[in-house]
Structure formats: structure tokens, C-alpha cells
Amino acid sequence: MSLRLATFNVENLMNRFDYSGYRNQLNEDRTLALFEIHSEAEYRLLEQARAIAHADDMRQLTALAIAETRADIICLQEVDNIEALKAFEYGYLFKMVGQGYQHKYTTSGNDSRGIDVAVMMRAETAHGEPIEFVRMTSHAHVTFEELGLHTPELASLGQEPFERIFRRDCLEIDVKIGGKPLTIYSVHFKSMGSPRNGLNGRDATMPIRVAEAKAVRRIIEDRFGKDHAADKRWVICGDMNDYRERLVISGDAYQGYGFTPVQETASCLDVFLADGFAENVVARRQEMDRWTLYHTRGPLERHLCQLDYILLSPSLARTNEQAVPDIVRRGQPWRTIFPPGQEVDRYPRAGWDRPKASDHCPVAVTLSIT
């Protein structure tokens, strides 16, 4: 029997308005920055109008991207709450895939903006095998101290031993596919942010992501046994906000673009991959064709990289040696620079920068569950 599994950062699937931009220009949308606004009340009205007008096109594109994954189970990141997810599934996704993701799961995590991880699943696979929900466990409460993961590097970032490890959550979902057990770990690690303290954003926040990765690994090893985890059927899905390799982009649209593969010396992904604890199934794709996000801070800083992962247990990887994942890129905005031969037909109404399905691309893979 087979299961179609996907992960997707849907970028701020919210059911509330954010008015913090009135006092904090870093949070102010660039559209409103064009206008002279005389009061907070006026700002609130304009922000409501802007957010609503922008959301409809974006969520149509988000739904198209999810529909294209053809997933039986999909892990999502940046979901406001279960009400927002239900409204999106009913109002947008249902119109494209019909009666599909009836079962939805999320918990309130630790993110300061309130964005959480979530899982949606069908009642059965595309081949008619029942998908049975068994249990859900949140690990949002776990602290550095509990798992012995506090380090001097974390202390230098102001992280105290009693503070929670996960910036959002590690949501553990147990299911049975046609009676066969599978455990899914849905995660969204600490974002890189802006440069600080003489370091780029990635390096400055690396200790937190490393701690999150170590915590996920400890949770799995404690659950299945350190010596037996490799033989169990589990998968880690989500936005790790980190990469082991990237494609650095040079040139321009007139003289042509260049794409140079660069290997990183360190990554939080090393916690999972360096010793074979798990396999990054996306690495089975060609080196130039593994990216799930386009990053740019202008012409002098542009690259493509993989931030979105489906990590298989050794047992699951062995029984799916030929499985190669798909990356859905048709919801990308037109500003995204594609390597030669990878260009796609964008969904209708995709814009230069927005609207778009998300800044991330969904990743989906078909797995044999035996």
C-alpha cells in the first residue's frame, strides 16, 4: 500500500489582523508605507482592507499548490489556529479537491506571532486504504534543561535553561495506514532573521536550531529506543529554516544568470543526517533541483536553497529506495529565478512578488507502507 505525504509552509495563514505596524515600521506592510496615515484608527481600517484584498488571491494559489501535491497527509507550517485552517480548507481547498482533508490537527505552540504547525489528512489514501488517527502529542513545553541541551552558545543568545526549546512545536502524530503504524513529527524551526552581532542571520541563530534538531532526535530515540529507532517507521516533516547546500545566483536577466552550488560547513540538519539517523529524501533529486525557497536581499545576495524537508527513518528509506519526491513550484512569484530547464507555468494571477502560493514550495513523496 502507498501513502502520499507532503509538507508545506503556507506563509501566514491567519484569521486575524496585525496592527503592530502602526508603531513598528518593521511590521508595516509596504503598501501602507506609501500613504500618509493620520491615526491608528485610520491605520486599522486600511490594514483590514489591504489584508482582505491580498488574502483572496494568495489563498487561491495556496490551495492550488496543495491540490497539486495530491497528498493524503500534509504537514503545514505557519497556521494561525484550527479555525483558520478549517475556513481555508472549506472556502478554498474544497473547491479544488472536493471532500478531502476532513481531519485537521494543531496545537498552540510557542511562536510569538501565534503561527503553529498543523497536519491535515484524508480519511483514506488515494488507493482506498484507511488512514486511522491514533494519537497526537505536543512537545512545545520541553525545555533546554529537561533534555540537557543548554549550551554556552545558547546562553550568549540570552536563552535560559528553563526556557522552551521549540520556537513553535514538535507535533507528534501517530496514524495507521491500512493498519500499519506510522509516526509523523511536524516541525518548524527557528527562523534565521537579520544579521546581528557581527554574524549573518543564519549563523547567529544556528545554536537554537541545533538544539531543536537535537530535541527532535531525543524525542524519537526516547520513544522507540536509541538502538531500535532505525527499525521503526517514522518521518520528520517541516520547515527547518536551514540548509546544507545552496545555489548562489550571479548575473542578471540581460547577460544571463549563473548558478553555483555551495556546500555549507555546518547545519542543524547534520544532527539528523551526518550519521545516517535519517535520510533527506529530497537529496535523491539532482543537485541543481532540490531547492524549495528563493532568497534575496537584492542583486548582491541571491540564492536557492532547501528549507523544507521530509526526513525518513532508515527503515522507511530502505523500503522506499526508488521514491523520489516532487517539489511544487508553480505557486512561486515571477521574481523567483529558476535554473535553466526548471521553468514552470505559474498559476493564474501569480504576481511579480505577490500574490503567490507561499514563499516556500510544497514537497511531496509517495511512500510504500509495508
Image (tube, grey):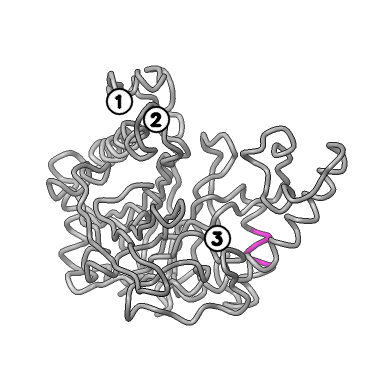
Q: Which residue is mark 1?
A: 147
Q: x, y percentage for residue 28?
A: 68, 43
Name which residue type carries label 3.
His
Q: CA distance from mark 3 to mark 2?
A: 28 Å
> Counting residues from the N terminus, which is met first, the one under dot 1 or under dot 2?
1
Name the residue rendered at 76%, 56% in the picture. Answer: 50
- Residue 46 is labelled as none
Q: Nearer the viewer, residue 30 or 117?
A: 30
**Other residues around mark 2 within 10 Å, as few (<14) / some (14–19) / many (≥20):** many
> In which quadrant of the rendered view does residue 303 lie?
bottom left
Numbered range of the magenta stretch:
86-90
**What is the secondary structure assignment of the residue under circle 1?**
loop
Magenta includes 111?
Answer: no
Query: Pointer 2: what residue?
Result: 165
Instruction: Tell me the crowding category of disc 1: few under 14, some 14 to 19, or many 20 or more residues within 10 angstroms, Cα based.
Output: some
Percent position (x, y) of residue 97? 57, 77
- Label 3 or label 1, whichever comes before in sequence order: 3
Kindly report which numbered mark, 3 or 1, lies closer to the viewer in this rendering: 1
Observer-side mark, 3 or 2, equals 2
Q: Are marks 1 and 2 in contact (CB under 8 Å)?
A: yes
Q: Residue furthest front?
A: 255
